[in-house]
Image: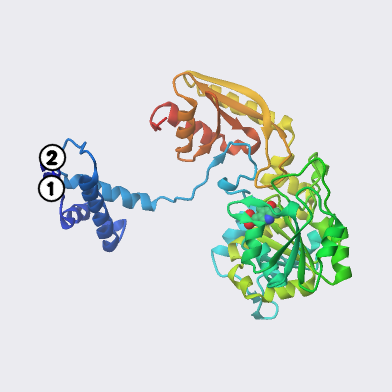
Amino acid sequence: MDEKRKSLLKSLPKIDEVILLLEKKDIYSLASREIVKGMTQKVVQKLRDEIVNASQIENSASRIDVNYVAQAVEKLIKDLHQCHLQRVVNATGVILHTNLGRAPLSPEALQRILEVGCGYSNLEFDLSRGERGNRYDHVREIICTLTGAEDAIIVNNNAAAVLLVLNTLAEGKEAIVSRGELIEIGGEFRIPDVMQKSAAIMREVGTTNRTRLSDYEKAIGADTGLILKVHTSNYRIVGFTEEVDIVSLTALGKRNGVPVMDDLGSGCLLDLDKYGLQHEPTVREVVASGIDVVTFSGDKLLGGPQAGIIVGKKDILERIAKNPLNRVLRIDKFTLAALEGTLIHYLNPDRAASSLRPLKALTESAGVVKKRASKLISKLRKEKFAALTISLKESFSTAGGGSLPLEKIPTFLVGVENSKISASRMEAGLRKAKVPVIVRVDNNEILLDLRTITEDEFTFIIRGLRQCLSGKNPAPA
Ligand SMILES: *Cc1c(COP(=O)(O)O)cnc(C)c1O
């Protein structure tokens, strides 16, 4: 070891020395003795490792100052106090952006969470009888009313719902599924893998592009536990294709005494055609086929919290409810509260379309989006940012979240270009703002899609731009 390393190592302050200094700064108001000590040890150890392992010592200082170490520890502890999960502005135009939390909740849903969360609740208590109740009771009635189903169970997410239903109905038995529906949703959700984990035996039928009723029929035998249909959510097979509709599949299951399940994915409760979008099978339509079980997400087209909703025949859902896996996957009180607060909107479908933010974003006319874009432009112009070129552009938004993959929704963007700061620097600056703004970059411009931005969020965009254009938050390019 060279002399420089040796003297630096020797100069590393003692843990107690650092702690003494931190005590003077009233560090124990921020964290316990144990945490402060552990964090100090961590910082000193990291410095020691750096001195020993760095190929070259760049630090020109000949000793490590105790103040420097104390400041590093204080910063780490202060960082722990910052909430890591935070609100962002989604300016990407991807409406159900899985990385950005999918569906924003309605004020009503948020109010339900507050009310239920701030005290005790009747989560599993039947108030009329004064005895133990069932957590699904709170939403069963409204879900059955909206979908026409006999019964409903809610779990953590739709992936969990699929796993639970497969395991209940087809553990150790064959689940028949079309080769055209063995899909990957992303984030490790692949139908064949989930089937394997559920202990159902995958029985593939048909081909990638064409599967007929006779394919299913021939596969039915003594080992059959279930016929599974999967919505191909995020992709489409076009051209020479054939698939079996749910009515024929349900009838086939009935003739053979085999339950039929549809993993619907998005779980649309609204006739999207009425709002100028392509047809997406609604849960009610699928339930009306007489199918045994349907599963869908709470936070895709439904516009609520992350949840997996299972609806269907009472006898089958009773079996699902009794599966020990159901206890593992069960929904919590906050999600249940938010789901209830979301479902209420659907009692009046037009109200749901205009008040649930993801549905509003999907169904709002391009003209209204354009007006909002013009408003943002005039607000930005008022700021008199130097060297900024602001323009209005036509483009397309997407539904995201594996929903409506072919839908290109006309939208308006605001393009912002700065002759002094590169677009990637602006993008990074906005991403690191107090309320981060997530934008697209195209050539030397950042693009803000007004379809996913509300007027309330303009202030965050303006503050973010002020910060990154003033250079107060220099983000690396
Ligand atoms: C999205 C989706 C899932 C997974 O749902 P999560 O709620 O994200 O767990 C499962 N199946 C299909 C068909 C989907 O589209």
For badge 2, the amino acid type reads Ser
Would you name the residue on which mark 2 appears? 62
Q: Residues within 10 Å of mark 2 (few under 14, many from 20)?
A: few
The residue nearer to you, when weighing 57 against 68, is 57
310 lies left or right of 194: right
Can residue 123 be seen from the camera position used here?
A: no
The answer to whether mark 2 and mark 1 are in CB contact below 8 A is: yes
Tag 1: residue type?
A: Ser
Query: What colouring style does the render use?
Result: rainbow
For this rendering, which residue is in front, 417 or 352? 417
Give whichever of 84, 371 is nearer the camera.
84
In the image, residue 474 above or below residue 105:
above
Residue 170 rendering spot, x and y as whole percentages:
71, 70
Task: Place residue 390 in its image quadrant.
Answer: top right
Residue at image point 16% right, 44% down = 65
The image quarter in which residue 296 lies: bottom right
Of the image marks 2 and 1, the number of the one nearer the N terminus:
1
Residue at mark 1: 11
Kind of element beneath mark 1 = helix
- Residue 303's place in the image compared with 422, above or below, is below
x, y percentage for residue 435? 49, 40
Location of the C terminus (image quadrant) = top left
Q: Could you classify mark 1 by the number of other residues whose Cα lies within 10 Å: few (under 14), some (14-19), or many (20 or more)?
A: some
